[in-house]
Image (cartoon, grey):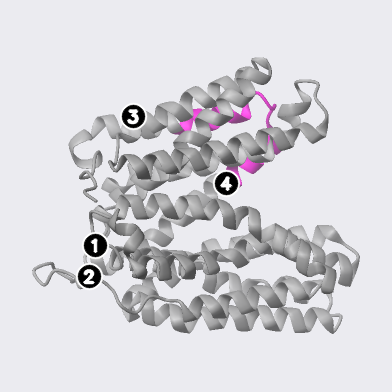
Amino acid sequence: MTLLRNSGYWRWSAGVQLNRLPGMMAPLAFTVLTTATTGSYRLGGIMMAVFVAAEMVGAVPTGRLLDRVGPARGLVVLLPLVAAGLFLLAAVASAGAPDWVLLALAIPPGLVAGGLNGGFRTLLAATVTEDELPRAVSVDAMILEGVIVGGPLLVALLATSGPVVPILAMAVVALLAALLVPRRTVQPDPQRTVERQPIPFAACVPWLAGLFTVGLLLSTIEVGLLPLVLRLGAPESATAIVIVVLCGASLAGSVLYAARGKAGDPRLFLAGFVLGGIVVSAGFGWAGLLGGVALIGLCTGPLMAVSSVNLQKLLPERRRSEGFSLAFTVQASGFGLGSLAIGVLPVWLAPLLGVLAALVSCAMLVARPRRAIGTPSVTS
């Protein structure tokens, strides 16, 4: 597999994982900080909500800026700005600032950080060849699983040295990510146009809907693990079993997708989401819960990979950072809606929202099969 020998890809991967790590650390880091400095863990939750809202507001403008100045050049400048904002937040918190100041200082790094993932994703297209891209996205999804788990664990470890230390670590990680922004990239085809063209939003909608579905159904399962387990009469500790199954299935799905070396039909993965969500909702005992969660996990990585690859084919070269930033924002909104659904709907009904979103996505792909489905096979 040529991807494994591509040193540029591994530099990109290290940079993008470091860029993601502060976001994975933030929920627990903010909670630790506010609990120690103000005595309120709830303030940490509000800080995280403010930070995420700022990311969503700033994602597309930041992505548009990266497209104008160049993703590599822009990331090298913006990542230190994120670090500076986090350093300032840590310093002000240590000085005993009031709650509203902490909330306000969570906004600037969020506004800047929102579009950085889109910039890194744009650089991936210039770091690997077109044939390597599906596998590259899939391998990235596997590594991301480790970052998701490792972020909170790192915070828990660092918090033993002081409540501000995790925030300082987030800033240092952002600086390290700036050092790993890829410099050497695959040269674009000189015959390809680089003019700023409009984003074909209508053609992108099916793939954006797929990413929204991933966020919606996954967050519904993750946030609703406790009530889903309690519904079976099991103790709270049993949620760990479901988490292991979900993470293991997600990792296995990405591995199989990368090993197969073909893009696959996204409607198959969406069908897995539909069936898995229905089984989880129906409540067929432990077999139903674990089986439905496993099916959802198996389809998560492949659906994200095929959606990302097809979005790249549709996005104009000079609008990719903006387009991918929009995609990440759409997926984040799915995560937010899934969390809200668990809070306001019966536990059996909430997963059906994800099922509905998957059905709508599948219907849109059926309606435009030639334009929206399929990518070339990977030839390693």
**Disc sitting over residue 370 in the figure:** none
Give, as a three-letter code, the residue at label 3: Ala
In the picture of the structure, the residue carrying the numbered disc 2 is 196
- Is 358 placed left or right of 373 in the picture? right
- Is 163 placed left or right of 190 in the picture? right
Residue at disc 3, secondary structure: helix
Question: Camera-side residue: 158 or 36?
Answer: 158
In the picture of the structure, the residue carrying the numbered disc 3 is 363
Which of pointers 3 and 4 lies earlier in the amino acid sequence? 4
In the picture of the structure, the residue carrying the numbered disc 4 is 335
Residue at disc 4, secondary structure: helix
Number of other residues with Cα within 10 Å of mark 4, as a class: few under 14, some 14 to 19, many 20 or more? many
**Residue 377 in view, yes or no:** yes
**Residue 162 in view, yes or no:** no
Callouts 3 and 4 close, C-beta under 8 Å: no
How far separated are the C-alphas under marks 1 and 2? 7 Å
Give, as a three-letter code, the residue at label 2: Arg
